[in-house]
Amino acid sequence: METPVSEGLINGLYIIPILAVLILVHEIGHFVAARLIGVKVEEFGIGIPPRIKGWRRNGVLWSLNWIPFGGFVKVLGEDGKATDPESINAKSPAKRAFFLVAGSAMNFLLAFVLMILVVGFQGVSRSNVYIASVVPGSPAAAAGWNTGDRIVEVAGVPVESSTDVGARAREFGGKPMSVVVERNGEAVETSVVPRLNPPAGEGPTGVGITDSPIADASVAAISASSPASQAGFQPGDRIVAIGSQQVSDPYALQFALTNASGTTISVDVIRGGEHATVSLAVPELQPEGDLLTQLGLDLAIKPRFDRVPLGSIIPVGVAQAWEQSGQMLSGIRDLVTGRAPLDQIAGPLGMGQITSEIVSASPLPLWVTLAQLAILLSLNLAVLNLLPLPALDGGRLLFVIVEVLRGGKKLAPEREGIVHVAGLILLLGFMVIVLVLDALRIYEGRSFLP
């Protein structure tokens, strides 16, 4: 029997093949682009040197290297000195730019293809958006928002995810914004004024927001002599309401049970296709313990998916991937401007922790969870590589743009090389810092997810 620790370790290892595939796809993009523009590829490396083994085929050295998180395509003329017709240095700015963006383009393409496959085979899931916490003295507190409120509408537009709320709040910075929340089954109209320069980690309105996928919660097992057993729950019961709280997602269920701590509450269930009601005596729940374990309930959470018509699969998949790309750019902007905490940055070790936590917490089928994670990371890799930073594709692309602006006059290869070497050293130093922070987080038992 696997222990939670060993299970968490195994779940975390999923990140290795995911990253390997993403990096391989990225480098294939550079490889194919080089061949298309007539540039000689000297080496295609999987991993970062030192080299384990190399094979030469069709004039290309195919190498396998010791550090697994990375890869590269080495082409003739990268040093800016070679003038051979097959050198990248001898190609036009347009062709060099094509070569530099090809890796990120492949990662974007992979993310879009994966999203289309998820939409086609699994369908589309929907989520409810809840206020998980309210900072005292914040605009949200002044607006009368409460923990557990479901956000229904923002500025007259229905809310589908937490990113909708954040995007709208930034648009209305310093101006009143109408928000409709659902509380105890009733719609409550409120108005909030998002802050232009909120304190670090609080966001424009001062709330913590969580997405909870719409799902069915059914009783899988019941512990003997537990509150759930005494209430008369039966395996297969589907919970539809707790008191006045309709249960359509895991957060609503947890919130309703937590609020019922120390009381007796009615629970509506569907049993054998018919409605039934049980009376559950909820003990004083211990915050440090698992809620359902204290009640003696083992629930099976089954997310609901809406099937997408065959003719709409590609448009819907593309639209969802495009939306995630926009969210990615917003997240990077928030990191740069300080709106999002820097502890959200993770290296390979942190990615393993994220993967383990997401796989353990997700009620989705494993393949869907891993596909969604691969989509997110593929978009990350695509966007980050295009940032205008030395040693990255975006940094090299910046030099091509500068060359065009100077009327085709290149910067001295030595100067460009110094910039990229310095950037690489800084990048490696930053990666070491992130690695240490990831290790400290895991050692201290802190979760990466909120």
Image (cartoon, rainbow, N blue to C red):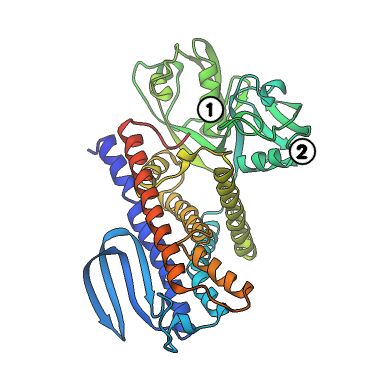
Q: Secondary structure at mark 1?
A: helix
- Circle 2 packing at 10 Å, graded few (<14), some (14-19), many (20+), is some
Q: Position of residue 437 (x, y in %)?
A: 36, 39
Q: Position of residue 184 (x, y in %)?
A: 66, 22
Q: Is residue 75 left or right of residue 121?
A: left
The image quarter containing residue 346 is: top left
- Compared to residue 199, the image places residue 415 above or below, namely below
Q: Secondary structure at mark 2?
A: loop
Q: Residue at x 46, y 62 (%)?
A: 392
Dot 2 corresponds to which residue? Answer: 155
Q: Is residue 214 left or right of residue 286?
A: right
Residue 185 seen anywhere in this rendered image of the structure = no
| Residue 13, label in figure | none
Foreground pick, 264 / 334: 334
Q: CA distance from mark 2 to mark 1?
A: 28 Å
Q: Position of residue 285 (x, y in %)?
A: 44, 15
Q: Position of residue 173 (x, y in %)?
A: 73, 37
Q: Residue furthest bottom?
A: 85
Q: Residue at x 67, y 26 (%)?
A: 140
Label 2 vs label 1, nearer the camera: 2
In the rendered image, the quadrant that contains the N terminus is top left
Dot 1 corresponds to which residue? Answer: 253
- Compared to residue 29, the image places residue 224 above or below, namely above
Q: Amino acid at mark 1?
A: Leu
- Circle 1 packing at 10 Å, graded few (<14), some (14-19), many (20+), is some
Residue 29 seen anywhere in this rendered image of the structure = yes
The image quarter containing residue 360 is: top left
- Compared to residue 281, the image places residue 21 above or below, namely below
Q: Are marks 2 and 1 in contact (CB under 8 Å)?
A: no
Q: Residue at x 54, y 44 (%)?
A: 335
